[in-house]
Image (cartoon, rainbow, N blue to C red):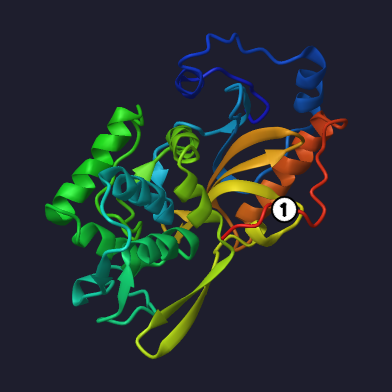
Amino acid sequence: MLSRFFVSGLTAMLLATSPLVLAQPEHEMQLAASSVPRLHSSAALVVNAQTGEVLFGKNTDRMMSIASITKLMTAMVMLDSGQPLDELITISEAEIDRLKNTSSRLAVGSVLSRREMLLLALMSSENRAAHALGRTFPGGMQRFVGLMNARAMMLGMKDTRYVEPTGLSSSNQSSAHDLATLVNVAHGDSLLRELSTSPGHEVTVGSRVLQYNNTNRLVKSPTWDIGLQKTGYISEAGRCLVMQAEVAGRKLIMVFLDSAGKFSRLGDAERVRSWVEKMHPGSSISLGAAATPRS
């Protein structure tokens, strides 16, 4: 049931060093039970990142295709490896998508730094950039994907598997539960926070200057304070979104998978925010126009 509050393995992971007993205050449970948001996502999870309290859960352990949410693990493994971010990487024919036949403005022969490849992969979900990061990794693509799976296993993401670094394959699968764990860990990396929430960036490719924008329009909204995010879409996965955001003075992790409709994942985020603000009417934060700028 959507109104069910529960303690999960995620909670134990988030609070590994803090033996906190989770319990909803009675008035919050009553309000939650009477006003649970009706979401368009097939699976969803909302967690208080500071306490591990699960506020909302729907099909949290269902293993599903995750599309470009994959790229969050791609970036994490890349940064963990310590590869030089200023090293130049060339887009090759190997980056051409022959699975979904998606297009890209990064033409074969384009040269960007590893940092710019990471930025485009996280901010704009650029598939060729993500694939190039894996292809040029020491040991090649097979080793890179192996490290993605090993990292997931190390984090206790038992319902997660990766077969490639872009998310174009529907065989890249995870659960809302596992992805909340991933978001929580990824948010601890300042560069992942910066790159994923950058509203836009210009890159110079040869004689062309290309403008890239964030695939999540909420990062530009003055009413949202987003610390980390990633979107995803392929037909098998539907519209997906993961975020860490501050709502009503609380740092929340939100996961929405297989949301029906082009804007429904953003709508679900808005519905959850409104719901949490109603639960805590005296602690809503007013961001005004002063959302922290991102570079």
Residue 78 or residue 39, whichever sits in front? 78
Neighbor class of circle 1 (other Cα within 10 Å; few <14, some 14-19, many 20+) is some
The one of 184 and 38 positioned closer to us in this rendering: 184
For this view, does 246 lie left or right of residue 240? right
Of all residues, the one furthest to the left in this rendering is: 139
Question: Looking at the image, which is closer to me, 142 or 118?
Answer: 118
Vertical relation: 95 (above or below) 110: above
Which type of secondary structure does the marked residue at label 1 adopt? loop
User: Where residue 133 sits: x, y (%)?
Assistant: 27, 60
Displayed quadrant of residue 96: bottom left
Query: Residue 277, image x and y in percent?
Result: 80, 36
Horizontal side of 194 relative to 3 (left or right) equals left
Q: Quadrant of the N terminus?
A: top right
Q: Amino acid at mark 1?
A: Ala
Q: Quadrant of the C terminus?
A: bottom right
Residue 239 appears in the rendering: no
Q: Is residue 177 above or below residue 30?
A: below
Residue plotted at (51% across, 48% down) = 193
**Which residue carries the number 1 mark?**
291
Residue at image location 22% in from the left, 48% down from the top: 145
- Residue 90 in the image, given as x and y percentages of width and height: 24, 73
Please give left or right for residue 61 compared with residue 88 in the image: right
Residue at the location (55% across, 17% down)? Answer: 7
**Which residue is drawn at the image coordinates 27% and 69% (left, top)?**
88
List x then y, in percent, for residue 17: 47, 14
The part of the image, by quadrant, that contains residue 148 is top left
